[in-house]
Image (cartoon, rainbow, N blue to C red):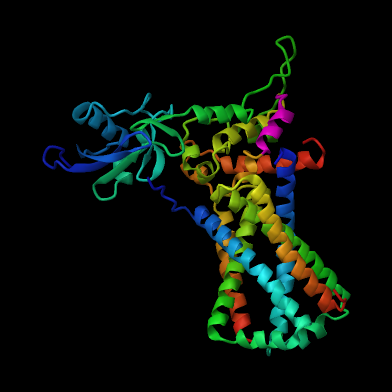
Amino acid sequence: MSPKQESLIWIAQRGSAMVLIIGLIVHLGAIIAAVQGGISAAEISGRMNGHTGWFVFYLCFLVAVSIHAPIGLRSILIEVTSLPNRSVGLISLLLAVMILAPGLRAIFGLYGVEW
Amino acid sequence: MKQQDENPKHLTVKVWRGTAQGEFQTYQVPRRDNQTVLDVVTHIQRHIDPGLSYRYACRVGMCGSCAMTVNGKPRWTCRTHVSKVTEGDTLEISPLRNHQVIKDLSVDMTEFFDKWARAEGAFVATKTRNDDFEAILPTDKQRKIASAGIECIGCGVCYSACDVVDWKKEYLGPAALNRAWTLVNDVRDGGMTVRLQSIAGDAGCHACHSQQGCVEGCPKHLNPTAAIAGLKRRAAIAVLKGEL
Amino acid sequence: MQQHRNHSNYWAFLVHRISGLVLAVFLPVHMLVLGLAIEDATRFDGFIEWTENPLVKLAETGLIILLAAHLTGGLRVLALEFLPWHDWQKTVIAITGGISLAIGLVFLLNAS
């Protein structure tokens, strides 16, 4: 990775971290409130369906974590394994897809959009 | 006050012998009051085993030549009192980690200094003797930042303490990056562009995880972690401005 | 030749890295389970019943603690990289923040 790319990755990691700190506080607050007295699929759909505010929030939250986790994994792979950089990049990208794809499906589905 | 002759205690000292391959050999060394680890090593070489290879110069904590791993931590042996580090009456002495071992306790520091050069740790002049002096006040913010890091004497303790150096062979390391940061803050220096390119790359500052083994170990109480954090911020500004 | 690593910032780093790795593995699972809520409500509710199992509750608690640890570890890194340096403050943020967050969450979750 070039100095430019490495620096951009660092910015993306710290930036997504800041988004996640705020997002997590909101998310955990919402979940704790929601699970009081048990949780069910119907409850979640009911809460999220058509609610644009939560839709936008969770989209941003999901994108942030889809950036943050793979970059973190990348550091671990580089320092702990002897995998070539190309493989490291591919595995990290794979994690991004594995979080983003089902996550988008869930968010769009709960909002009420057919995936 | 303990009389040395009346109470002859001994230290059991394990010393690394060999190169990267080798083994620990055990020696019994007379224990004295006010004894440093360098005293111990010197005693072994002079009175027990003349074949032991080790390095020192000033023996008063100024040159950094005597750095070795003592009970797992990199230290200046001339500044390490035995009473402060010994566990029971034992000591374990081995060469500095992360450097190639030449023999016994002597290491090859070529790569350490090569990385210093690779980090563009050299001042790039922009004026000639015919120009006027650059007027920099000692209270100048950037000068203070630079001054906080310039006392480094290249002893290699921080490099030895750093886990990232261990995990990532090309990583420039705390000393080289600390030096680069002092030059980034030197307004007279003309090498900013090239320097940012080298410290922000694959082998550069972004690999630091702020574990601060360097801060823990530096005998001059410098702070390479803070310097590296500064480099990260400076590189980010550079890329956002399109300078990288 | 083992290196002694008894200083707090080393442990902070290690906890941060391990918690991050565990959370990264957990996340795709989390998204898939959530997808069940729309796709197959019965299966989702069945899954929720399964999570009433005390062992699962324990694992959930563990995850929350790891999350709290990772978050406060991250706050420590951000403080080190962006704020003026004060030696002891950085570790204090991490420790106190982590403990309080973890306790709070565990209490609140167990209250449901």
Q: Nearer the viewer, residue B198 or A95?
A: A95
The segment highlighted magenta reads: B189-201
Which quadrant holds residue B2?
A: top left
**Image spot of residue B99 (x, y percent):** 45, 34
Which residue lies most toward the left here?
A: B6
Residue depicted at 67% across the width and 33% down the height:
B198
Q: Answer left or right for B74 relative to C37.
A: left
Residue depicted at 43% across the width and 39% down the height:
B97
The vertical placement of A93 against B101, above or below, is below
The vertical placement of B116 against A96, above or below, is above
**Image spot of residue B232 (x, y percent):** 68, 43
Please, what is the dominant secondary structure of the magenta stretch?
helix
Dividing the image into 4 quarters, which one contains the N terminus of chain B?
top left
Q: Answer left or right for A78 relative to B220.
A: right
**Image spot of residue B113 (x, y percent):** 53, 27
- How many numbered circles does the render carry? 0
Q: Is residue C52 visible?
A: yes
Q: Is residue A30 visible?
A: no
Q: Nearer the viewer, residue B98 or C40?
A: C40
Q: Nearer the viewer, residue B59 or A21?
A: A21
Residue B233 part of the magenta-drawn span: no
The vertical placement of C77 against B57, above or below, is below
